[in-house]
Amino acid sequence: MSLLNDRADSAAHAAIAGTGIGDAAGAVHDLDRLILLGIAADLHRRTRLRSGLAHGPGAVADDLGAAPRHRWIAGHWLSALHDAGLVGRDATGRYHDLHGPRRAELAAARTRMEAARLALGYPTELAELMLRSLRLLPSLLRDEIGVQALLYPDGEPATAEAVYRGNVISRYLNAAAAEVVRDLAERVTRPLRILELGAGIGATTADLLPALTGRPVEFYLFTDLSPFFLDTARRRFDAGFLRYALLDIAHDLPQQPGGLDLVVAATMAHNAPHVDRLLGQVAALLAPGGRVLLVETVREHPQSLTSMPFALSTDDGPPRRLDCRAGTTRTYLRREEWLSALAGSGLRIEVDLPRPGDPLTALSQRLLVAIR
Ligand SMILES: C[S@@+](CC[C@H](N)C(=O)[O-])C[C@H]1O[C@@H](n2cnc3c(N)ncnc32)[C@H](O)[C@@H]1O
């Protein structure tokens, strides 16, 4: 890997120095387990799977009173519960013998989740989010409340900040990303042109902007699908070079070939129906030597099963997936799939962190940077 990979890794480890993460893999397992047991308890309480007989996901969605666009989530959850050994599946794809967790098992899982949260340096908002999402599952499934209400209770971004910024892996990844931006700013002689996709609450932007202080920047175009985030960012940031625009990566990107020095997509590129197509269009927007910087989760992690799927449902049901995820309800690509998609777009991988063997890899979030 490149010198930049070493430089970004060192800077990022310096940024989290003193944060002991101990048994990260065990802590991740405990966060996942609480959500899986919570879903199993809900299905056991409210659906015919309680009988022990085999039933298809459609019957389970009926019992849950799921809104049409969220019906697919029943099958998505059952598949995750099956992977975790909490429900059986027969050759016809019907599920049976669902584990019904007892109160004491749920209480113990909750205690372990709290210890795991502390071990991984997540603020209390993460635990509140997980518990709130489990409590609200019936209303979420019926589409009576949206996922925004989970992530932005009272319209405040503290919970989303906890998920996207205030934890050890986000701090590591954002510090590494900032070092990449610093390197870019040192290298490019003309004013920089930067585009951020799905910039959301600006949890990544906030850590990248200081790396641009005192550097010539032509523009930093902050984009998102939702005007809510653009308005919030306008109030939050004051750098004179910031511009704002709505941009939906489910559609083709505006074509202005060859002019950008950096495209940032932090925990958002998996929202593209076809990531190879997205990366091909991003590559075409880059100047020679320009970079794309991705932060991505590279595993289907159960801890987000009670929030993420509700954000992904379209009016027609499950999200459209036309790439290597086609025919599945997978949300994320694996590391190897991202590496291959980046290389397939004619980009060379420069940064791939955390390094193999780093305990942070257990958190399954990565920084990938590729250069044109
Ligand atoms: C998980 S958040 C990440 C936010 C931000 N990048 C950060 O790190 O704080 C995902 C963001 O992607 C945006 N998003 C989802 N689908 C999108 C799409 N099709 N086009 C553009 N943005 C999208 C959401 O509105 C949300 O702000």
Image (cartoon, rainbow, N blue to C red):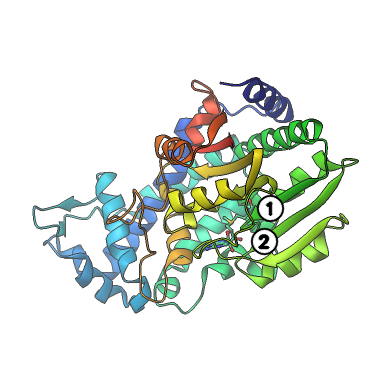
Q: Amino acid at mark 2?
A: Thr
Q: Position of residue 154 (x, y in %)?
A: 68, 71
Q: Amino acid at mark 1?
A: Leu
Which image quarter is the C terminus in? Answer: top right
Up-down relation of residue 144 to residue 125 (above or below): below
Q: Position of residue 327 (x, y in %)?
A: 27, 56
- The answer to whether 42 appears left or right of 130 in the picture is left
SS state under label 2? strand
Residue 62 falls in image quadrant: bottom left
Point 82% across, 51% down: residue? 218
Disc 2 under 8 Å from ligand 1? The reply is: yes
Q: Which residue is mark 1?
A: 195
SS state under label 1? strand
Up-down relation of residue 41 to residue 117 (above or below): below
- The answer to whether 262 appears left or right of 131 in the picture is right
**Mark 1 near mark 2, Cβ–Cβ under 8 Å?**
yes
Q: Nearer the viewer, mark 1 or mark 2?
A: 1
Point 52% across, 44% down: residue? 296
